[in-house]
Image (cartoon, rainbow, N blue to C red):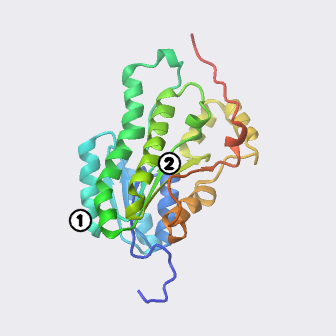
Amino acid sequence: MTSSDSRRLLGRTAVITGAGDGIGRAIARRYAREGANIVIAEFNAETGQQAAEEMATKFGVKAEFVQTDVCKKDQVEQMMTLASEKFGGVDILVNNAWAGGKIGRLENKTDEQMQFGLTMGFWSGLWTMRAAFPHMKAQRWGRIINICTLNGVNAHMGIAEYNVGKEALRAYSRTAAREWAPHQICVNVICPAAATSSFKQFQKMAPDVAAASSAANPMGRMGDPDNDIAGVAFFLASDDARYMTGNTLFVDGGSHINGVAWVPEFPD
């Protein structure tokens, strides 16, 4: 590699959870295009391996797939240890993983459902951040980008466990940003609105509601993970964002301005 290489993340290592598909994979592609080595922390072995192969073959970077259930602390910590051993440290961390959940009334949510939301939405991010911190502190450089949700900000109905888990992560992100700023570690949040695989599945289940949700967006559409979301995640990972921390960026076509009227029908 010559000194004339203009890729902005050359030599950096990025760990991205839930990077086998959707926003996570789009961010992985953008980081790899900019020269970063990529750790794909993904539960789905098929998509995770495919993502790692794509990063290596298409962009010529080092890429490692680690099958990871982010709801299990030991797997998260092992994945972070492997990332450090394989690449010598962790420069960029993106907490993106989410799976599961069931639409239902707040009063009918079980303790297990709410605990699942906290484990996947909040605890998994805490575990990765805690593991990445010593590396970032030692080198006095770090970028943590947590993917949260408009659903919690706008208090969308039916998905309390998701809202609570992601809002807990957002609160933790702000505190981490304050405490870790002296170490030159920037911690920021993206709340996206994008046509991910989950949204496309939702379109099939409730096409009228999905269409109304897209139409209510001020820009009249859902975002594209590659062209609308990943670029913002790249900015936050770059040196251009070195003086920016503790922020929530609504990458949503303006949906956060007045909220989205989403009122699902619940069985009694």
Which sits in the foreground, 91 or 211?
Answer: 91
Disc sitting over residue 17 in the figure: none
Q: Residues within 10 Å of mark 1 (few under 14, many from 20)?
A: few
The quarter of the image holding the C terminus is top right
Residue 144: percent from the left, percent from the top? 43, 57
* For residue 112, above or below residue 16: above
* For residue 241, above or below residue 224: below
Tally of marks? 2
Residue 212: percent from the left, percent from the top? 73, 34
Residue 218: percent from the left, percent from the top? 76, 45
Which sits in the foreground, 48 or 163?
Answer: 163
The answer to whether any part of residue 19 appears in the image is no
**Distance (Cα) linking label 2 and label 1:** 25 Å
> Which residue lies under the disc numbered 1?
85
> Which residue lies under the disc numbered 2?
147
Q: Residue at the location (59% across, 17% down)? A: 266
Q: Residue at the location (52% across, 58% down)? A: 26
